[in-house]
């Protein structure tokens, strides 16, 4: 097995750095999770596919991984800074207005389950721990008390963090903080435009569905405080890697870093341990041609919508892997269709391979990763080297995929060796190639008016007609199918007999 040093792009230094774990042999990773006030869109899910590939890569490199993803069920405002309403409270109010008497806790539970369903559908590995923000409120209050004297001040609306009390505030965002860049709506009395609430008091005369007592009155924790507390509590400061979408590089993560500096009582960011995590990594956005992906405007691109249209969720995962995580990726149905075709090719490659394996080898369970240093990969060694170098180069999944293609296409190679290597590579890419079948990839679109059984029966009748050289009947059946949106694919190189058009 080859051993290219793992290089990752650290947003804090804006450089690639060789991964050097805080605890030898271990990798501790924290990922900012979803705010469970609505379904995630597929752009959100790109963030978790990226974090999953990172975790799988750390495992491939032999580190014992502890991955934590949080669930934000309180505190995230409609604006990432300090403006707007709590997203959860807002959704609860909207539902109440529509006459749906759903509690905020039920809303959180419903969307958490929906998020987990997408996680499973995308073959994202379960992290070691899901931390739920409302389970950590006592620890959040204790954390805030610990930094309040030196770093915070109280206003009518809450306890605010004074960003001028830490060195290099905003270094992660490369932001100019003096004028706050006009992006942070001002709250009366704030000392600096970038100061942010770490505890939000419930306004007098109001009650919130989610509120707790604190030394600063009844209220709720700030969103940035949550991630500082959950990451530090579970992984211990400093831990190795903190991930999130690129938008978090601008406000959420700089604010977490400022809190971590205050909490650790050490300041300068030139010593990476002071920021809480040594490496901060950010995935770029999935965008629509029309602009930013949104849950409220246009077609709401949920994973379920893709499935309803007949696309397997792992085609979307493959679409993500074909781009570098730091590049913007434009979503298109054509692109998704191309990814599905590529996935079909790969699944067929593995199916052919499996058919050549002796006995138990046909059972995917027998094809586990099992790569060992010093194993002889013979003709496949260049593909393994290419894969390892690519994935170690800041997770270059696009090139790693071509190395897997090379393995599947290799001729005159022992099938068992080939299967073992393909399985190990897929252990990093997570396309579930050993379990997927061609039948799984053929998803019936929700709007289809014809069932798969009906199509199969029509094609069987057509075959009979062709055998009998009755081409008029054969063509008529083909036209009938076309009228129902089924394209017959005679001579398709992948062996697919039809597709829904
Ligand atoms: P939220 O539930 O809004 O907190 O977002 C969950 C995660 O999705 C965060 O890491 C965001 O940075 C990330 N994210 C939001 N929109 C996109 C997008 N269009 N593409 C990729 N990641 C996104
Ligand atoms: Zn976070």
Image (tube, rainbow, N blue to C red):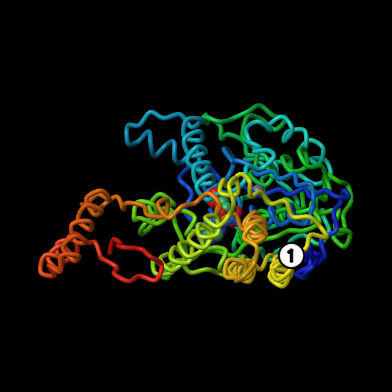
Question: Observer-nearest residue: 4 or 277?
Answer: 4
The residue pinned by badge 1 equals 377
Of residues 377 and 390, the one nearer the viewer is: 377
Who's the residue at 29% across and 68% down the image? 489
Q: Residue at x 60, y 71 (%)?
A: 411
**In the image: residue 455, left or right of residue 194:** left
Instruction: Report the front residue among 246 and 49.
Output: 49
**Disc 1 residue lies near ligand 1 with CB under 8 A:** no
Considering depth in this image, is 64 or 34 the residue closer to the camera?
A: 64
Q: Is the residue 291 above or below the residue 43 in the image?
A: below
Residue at the image position 24 percent from the left and 49 percent from the top? 451
**Image quadrant for the N terminus?**
bottom right
Q: Quadrant of residue 420?
A: bottom right
Q: Quadrant of residue 53?
A: bottom right
Secondary structure of the residue carrying tag 1 is loop
Estimate the x, y position of residue 381 in percent, counting from the top left.
Answer: 73, 69
- Residue 361: x percent and y percent? 60, 49
Q: Residues within 10 Å of mark 1 (few under 14, many from 20)?
A: some
Question: Does residue 438 appear in the picture of this structure?
Answer: yes
Q: Residue at x 52, y 38 (%)?
A: 112
Query: Residue 143, percent across and down?
Result: 77, 37
Looking at this rendering, what residue extends furthest in the left direction?
472
Up/down of 418 relative to 412, above or below: above
């Amino acid at each position: 097995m080859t051993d290219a040093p793992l290089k990752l792009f650290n947003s804090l230094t804006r450089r690639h750095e060789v991964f050097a774990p805080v605890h030898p042999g271990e990798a501790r990773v924290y990922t900012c999770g979803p705010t469970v006030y609505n379904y995630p869109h597929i752009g959100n899910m790109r963030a978790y596919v990226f974090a999953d590939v990172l975790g799988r890569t750390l495992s491939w490199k032999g580190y014992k991984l502890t991955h934590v993803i949080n669930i934000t069920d309180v505190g995230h405002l409609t604006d990432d800074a300090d403006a707007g309403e709590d997203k959860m409270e807002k959704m609860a109010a909207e539902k109440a207005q529509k006459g749906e008497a759903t509690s905020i806790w039920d809303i959180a539970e419903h969307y958490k389950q929906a998020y987990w369903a997408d996680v499973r559908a995308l073959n994202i590995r379960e992290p070691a721990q899901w931390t739920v923000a409302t389970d950590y409120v006592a620890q959040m209050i204790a954390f805030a008390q610990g930094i309040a004297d030196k770093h915070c001040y109280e206003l009518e609306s809450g306890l605010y963090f004074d960003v001028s009390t830490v060195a290099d505030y905003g270094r992660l965002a490369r932001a100019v903080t003096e004028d706050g860049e006009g992006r942070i709506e001002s709250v009366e009395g704030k000392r600096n435009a970038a100061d942010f609430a770490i505890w939000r008091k419930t306004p007098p005369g109001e009650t919130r569905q989610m509120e707790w007592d604190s030394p600063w009155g009844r209220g709720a924790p700030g969103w940035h405080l949550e991630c500082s507390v959950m990451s530090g509590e579970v992984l211990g400061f400093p831990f190795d890697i903190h991930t999130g979408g690129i938008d978090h590089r601008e406000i959420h993560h700089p604010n977490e870093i400022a809190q971590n500096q205050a909490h650790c009582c050490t300041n300068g960011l030139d010593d990476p341990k002071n920021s809480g995590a040594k490496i901060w990594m950010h995935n770029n956005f999935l965008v629509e041609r029309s602009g930013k992906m949104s849950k409220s405007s246009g077609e709401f691109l949920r994973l379920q919508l893709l499935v309803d249209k007949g696309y397997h969720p792992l085609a979307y995962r493959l679409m993500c892997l074909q781009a570098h995580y730091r590049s913007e990726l434009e979503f298109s149905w054509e692109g998704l269709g191309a990814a599905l075709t590529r996935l079909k090719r790969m699944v067929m490659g593995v199916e052919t391979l499996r058919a050549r394996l002796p006995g138990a080898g046909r059972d995917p369970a027998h094809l586990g990763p099992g790569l060992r240093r010093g194993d002889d990969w013979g003709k496949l060694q260049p593909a393994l080297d290419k894969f390892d170098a690519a994935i170690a180069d800041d997770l270059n999944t696009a090139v790693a995929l071509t190395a897997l293609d090379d393995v599947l296409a290799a001729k005159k190679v022992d099938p068992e060796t080939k299967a073992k290597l393909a399985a190990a590579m897929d252990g990093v890419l997570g396309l579930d190639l050993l379990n997927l079948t061609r039948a799984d990839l053929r998803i019936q679109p929700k709007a289809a008016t014809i069932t798969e059984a009906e199509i199969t029966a029509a094609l069987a009748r057509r075959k009979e007609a062709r055998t009998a050289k009755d081409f008029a009947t054969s063509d008529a059946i083909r036209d009938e199918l076309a009228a129902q949106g089924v394209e017959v694919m005679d001579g398709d190189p992948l062996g697919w007999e039809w597709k829904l058009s």
